[in-house]
Amino acid sequence: MTASITTESLASGYQTDTFKTKGGKEVVVTAIKHASLRMQYDGLEIQVDPVAEYAPATDYSTFPKTDVILVTHEHFDHFDRSAIAALTKDGTDVIANPAVQKMLGSGVVMTNGESRVVKGIRLDAVPAYNTTPGHTQFHPKGRDNGYVLTIDGLRFYIAGDTEDIPEMVKLKDIDIAFLPCNQPYTMTPEQVAKAARTIKPKVLFPYHYSQTPIKHVAELLAGSGIDVRIRNYQ
């Protein structure tokens, strides 16, 4: 087992979970909202899909300046110039899909299948797209990113907006997974459960779930051995 995993705590009004890496260091994950989350590791600040105005509004000026910002794609609930500006300092690495990098006018592009090391963290950009007929226009294949972060042996899969795509079978040794759950844009609870059984993470955070009855995911995965954690990612 690559990590020991501790339970939820509360800090500054946000739900947090703390995980230990292979080397015994802590990674703290803060649930901000919807698809927005913060990760802290060994003095590094990482923000994923920071968005200020998507309800509830988030004042990113109250957060520390960040070292790495990951943006999965250009939709308004994932990409926000003002939030990125509030978090950016000299040396901040903004990693994004090609459309976001073009719209932002800066940052580093990663495309599906590309890997790089950023500030000691391995990043793999993986596919994220819709497959259900009539839904493929929301997230067409090849445009958007999910990300796998390997932090001192601890592997996080942040899926972005996707369905239970065939490429998930290639994801190996995932410790913590974030899977979206709000059809027609992403997955149904049943699709999330199928994806989780394919990926087999130790811990699953259903996220991006809007009005979906998200506890149904936990019910569907009862007995699977996957620790399903419901946090404030509505």
Image: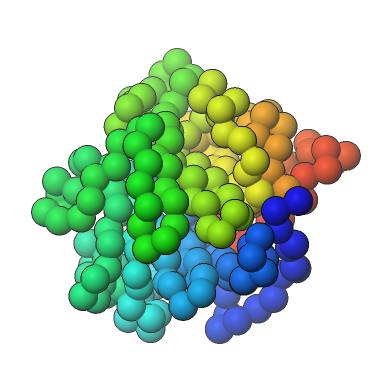
Residue under the image location 35 percent in, 37 percent down? 114
Nearest to the observer: residue 224 or residue 45: 45
Can you see residue 196? no
Q: Quadrant of residue 74?
A: top left
Q: Is residue 127 left or right of residue 61?
A: right
User: Horizontal and vertical percent for residue 100?
Assistant: 22, 47
Farthest top residue in view: 133
Can you see residue 1? yes
Nearest to the observer: residue 51 or residue 149: 149
Q: Is residue 161 left or right of residue 229?
A: left
- From what the image shows, is residue 171 above or below residue 83? above
Farthest left residue in view: 105
User: Horizontal and vertical percent for residue 115?
Assistant: 37, 41
- From what the image shows, is residue 118 above or below residue 83? above
Residue under the image location 53 percent in, 58 percent down? 151
User: Horizontal and vertical percent for residue 36?
Assistant: 45, 60
Residue under the image location 30 percent in, 36 percent down? 111
Nearest to the observer: residue 146 or residue 124: 124
Nearest to the observer: residue 142 or residue 214: 142
